[in-house]
Amino acid sequence: MTRKRVSSLVASLSLDEKLRLLHGATDPDDSSVGYVPPIPRVGIPALRMVDGPMGVRAVGGSATAFPASVALAATWNPRLAREQGASMAREARAHGQNVLLAPGTNVVRVPHCGRNFEYYSEDPHLSARFAAASVRGIQSEDVVATVKHYVANNQETNRYRVSAAVSERALREIYLPAFRAAVEEADVGAVMTAYNRVNGTHMSDHRPLLRDVLKDEFGFDGFVMSDWWGTESSVGAARAGLDVEMPGVTFEERATAERLPEDVDPADVEFPETLPDMHEGGLFGEPLRDAIESGAVDESVVDGKVRRVLETMARFGLLGADSDGGRRGGELDTPRHRQLARRIAVEGTVLLKNEGALPLDEAAAVALVGPNADAAKLGGGGSSEVTPVARTSPVDGLRERAAECRFERGVPRITESSLFDAFGAGDGGESTADADDADDDASLDAALEAAAEADCAVVVVQDDTTESEDRDDLRLPGRQDELVSAVADAADRTVVVLRTGGPVQLPWVDEVDAVLETWYAGQAEGEALAAVLYGDADPGGRLPLTFGRRADDYPTAAPERFPGANDEVDYSEGVFVGYRYFDREDIAPLFPFGHGRSYASFEYGESSVERDGDEVTVTVPVRNVGNRPGKEVVQVYVRDEDPPVPRPPRELKGFETVRLDPGERRRASVTLDRDAFAYYDQDEGWVVSEGRFTLLVGRSAREIRDRVSVALG
Ligand code: BGC
């Protein structure tokens, strides 16, 4: 449908009908997380929205549970994000849905953040590559992608009130690039605003960031929706550029979708501080009509919003005589989706340390120890929870692959948070109640005996992170640190498998032989873990965030920077987020950004540089000098040698993944455009300083293999 026809469609709608398109309603099928009702009179179908980003959360339905977004980013392989996006979209369609509430692309600023697992990285370039790829994948299957949460939603503590006091430079250089890439490179159909405020204004009401930056400057022409119950006002939000209020109805009105126990009256539910006030809804309904009638909001403003919604629908084939309203079916839990979940889990596994313990010997007797190792770690708590059709735990995976495998829990199970516990309804998966029953069989002695008798002990440990709460500290919960040390003492060889949503402290790291980070590996965890442990596959992952030695080493250690005070959090570290801070302060991380080992070994040759106008291409010869096939991620960091303003000592601006057989040699090429050298100046905008830059070619932010110099002017 052409723009012109959309305009005449808008003109044919009554004010009532227009307002119906600007806020959600109760879903009669009870399958969507968000539902904008249809207008059958003129052939407008419903918008049906479901959560991602790690799989489809269709209410009450199952779907492929992919690894967490942080694991996806750890692959450093954006093609996988594209494939995962396309697969999620096919599954959304199979559930009759046409909008995916994914990807989440906030920058990991605070290592404690409960939602880090749903995001990609502490680095804006890596986040941007994955955001764009994911959006392209989702939209390639004619499902609208929603990039979220715009912007500076970097903590869960006090998320509805907190204001990020952040400089324009930090916004431009760190927090906005992934959103910009989703818009400018991938033409994303929808953007979801964040709950928090930025520099004092709620994001739903933030005219400079919504209208001026997102729409006018980046050229976003889709629609902006609020986060759930995250619309602050009617008039303010309408004028600022919010297009659609979600979910647009009160908790009471959509209580069935919340799967409340029968004896709970939705009107009586009191929400904890960690949840929004869901007794309010419909700000873009009656109150907006009143505002139009009183003249506070011009009806043309409403028309503009409706036009955005309908143009997006038209773009995705949801309008017009030959449209099926997005109900053309899809694909659910097919072999290719299952295999992709497994592949991402393998490629996202980061081998942090290996002193000869891995790969495991085929004949090895394995003691598998860990409080929750008999359940797959699907994800963290919250709106991203997915219920898969099938899942394999580490115990399943190892029992299938190992010559001999004894499982012992060792210490009591770690409770896993679910957002839905907050009002009494679980996700129907492996619940905490089952977990408590299982504690009876936790015996440290039995675990130590198993470890002592085995050739190798594999200890699976985890954190517990969830939307709406941040972690109190970066330690592994429960008695897991004690468990690892005791097993390391008892066993000949100890391999630790981390299942965490972000960095954790590893006080026992020197006592163990190998450490793998598998994040939240999703439904194929067990198979993927066995494949990596036995070397059937190379652990292909590299860290998308820094593992510091101590919580105090991170830039957000000061309380005013996290969790903030008086509803304000001070982003005074500016652009020095993640490794940019560790580098500036010269703090040695435990494992640096970009780090990850392979079972192969790689030799780097001398890099060469070619200039073509403003573009600089670095070419790096890499050879596999090991005796196994492996994957190497060649990373290029830029350093401004004489910056007029303080700049990070190195910033990732490009990377390329190469796969090499033993003895094989290839060239990795990374092209940097002018933007790769620029910083943001409040008055002048993007500036490239005249002078010398060094390109650092490495295996991580700290393992630099070569340097080349370029002069720009
Ligand atoms: C989350 C969003 C999610 C929405 C709908 C909110 O709590 O912040 O990421 O898409 O709920 O479930």
Image: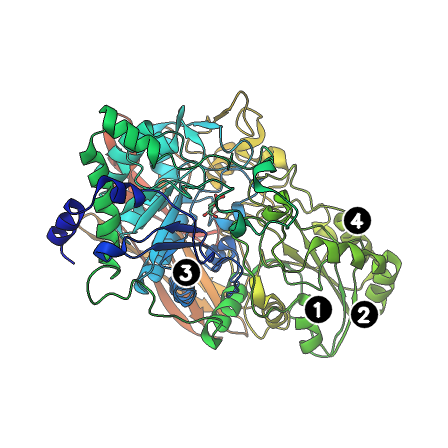
Q: Which residue is mark 3?
A: 81
Q: Secondary structure at mark 1?
A: helix
Q: Pointers 4 and 1 in contact (CB under 8 A)? A: no
Q: CA distance from mark 2 to mark 1?
A: 15 Å
Q: Which residue is mark 1?
A: 395
| Mark 3: amino acid | Ala
Q: Earlier in the sequence, mark 3 or mark 2?
A: 3
Q: CA distance from mark 3 to mark 1?
A: 28 Å
| Mark 4: amino acid | Glu
Q: Secondary structure at mark 2?
A: loop
Q: CA distance from mark 3 to mark 2?
A: 38 Å
Q: Nearer the viewer, residue 293 or 316?
A: 293
Q: Secondary structure at mark 3?
A: helix
Residue 696 visible in rendering:
no
Q: Earlier in the sequence, mark 4 or mark 3?
A: 3
Q: CA distance from mark 2 to mark 4?
A: 19 Å
Q: Position of residue 126 (x, y in %)?
A: 40, 50
Q: Which mark is residue 454?
A: 2
Q: Earlier in the sequence, mark 4 or mark 1?
A: 1
Q: Pointers 2 and 4 in contact (CB under 8 A)? A: no
Q: CA distance from mark 4 to mark 1?
A: 21 Å
Which image quarter: residue 92? bottom left
